[in-house]
Amino acid sequence: MRRSGKITIAHLVARKREARPIPMLTCYDFSTARLLAEAGVDVILVGDTYAEVCLGHESTIPVSMDEMVSIAAAVRRGAPQAFLIGDMPFLSYQVDPNDAVRNAGRFLASAGCDCVKVEVDRRLAPTVEAIARAGIPVMAHLGLGPQSIHRLGGYRCQGKTAEDALRIIEDARIMEEAGAVALLLEAVTNEVARSVAERTALPVIGCVSGPFCDGQVLVLHDILGYTAGHRPRAVKCYADLHQTLTDAFSRYAEDVRQRDYPRDSDGAAMPAEEAEKLRQKLQGAE
Ligand code: KIV
């Protein structure tokens, strides 16, 4: 049965065609997914940045397929109408295209995702092709691939030389040909983002890649001022949850220390006659 109001890839393609920018955020849990849905953010990435912002790892590399599928299912429960993208974790697709198809399928079958995302370059075109051939919508993530951070040697802007820019622009074309339904460009120059977005009918989502893409994605914790460590310079902050939450936690801790919470009225009292019976029984037992 088709749910009315459900966002599909056709909606994203139409938004690109109509030049209506697509807001997208990462999300990792049910309660936050409900807030995103309420706020009208209807494209959600269950990103492997979960490893960093929720699990406290140094990189995205340690998170597993099981963890990603489990949190994607929680996000889906919170945002039933969203276009939901499951981020395929490190080594869930790089080794063997058959594994890639099976793992991608888990995001759809077990978590209710609409699409999967893979960090790729042209060498992984056969994998993108295999996933697409299996009927699984796939978003190709190009530019900076955090899963390759050890090879790249750091979080650096990509496409700064003409040669590097042409390589990324050509990779985007190859991914479209391989059957990707959307592209994500992370940390590429404005020129690369513009060239890629202008040369394809696919929706192109930018992540700290300037203003020329068809949509934008950021890590939720970064825009909320909730990130423990480094936040990229180009990320705009829309709240200061660090301050708001530490204030709330300190006030709670102080209330408990001062016995200001809970008070009598915050607890449940027994009916008077039962309390009296209890008092007598306890006295009799002494
Ligand atoms: O995992 C993630 O959050 C991502 C975004 C940075 C695009 O891939």
Image: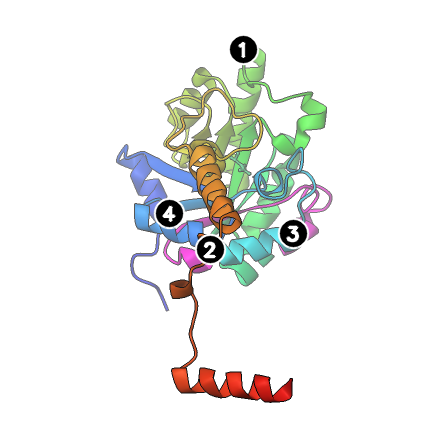
Q: CA distance from mark 1 to mark 3?
A: 37 Å
Residue that extends furthest to the top in the rendered view of this protein: 161
Number of numbered tags placed on the structure image: 4
Determine contact: label 4, label 1, CB under 8 Å. Answer: no
* Residue for point 64% across, 39% down: 56
Q: CA distance from mark 4 to mark 1?
A: 38 Å
Q: Is mark 2 within 8 Å of ligand 1?
A: no
Q: Is residue 102 magenta?
A: yes
Q: Secondary structure at mark 2?
A: helix
- Closer mark to the observer between disc 4 and disc 1: 4
Say what amino acid the circle numbered 4 marks.
Leu
Q: Kindly identify which residue carries mark 4.
A: 36
| First reached walking from the N terminus: tag 3 or tag 4 | 4
Say what amino acid the circle numbered 1 marks.
Ala
Which mark, residue 30? 2
Tell me where residue 84 appears, x and y as whole percent.
45, 50
Q: Nearer the viewer, residue 95 or 210?
A: 210
Q: Kindly identify which residue carries mark 3.
A: 65
Residue numbers of the magenta segment: 76-103
Q: CA distance from mark 2 to mark 4?
A: 10 Å
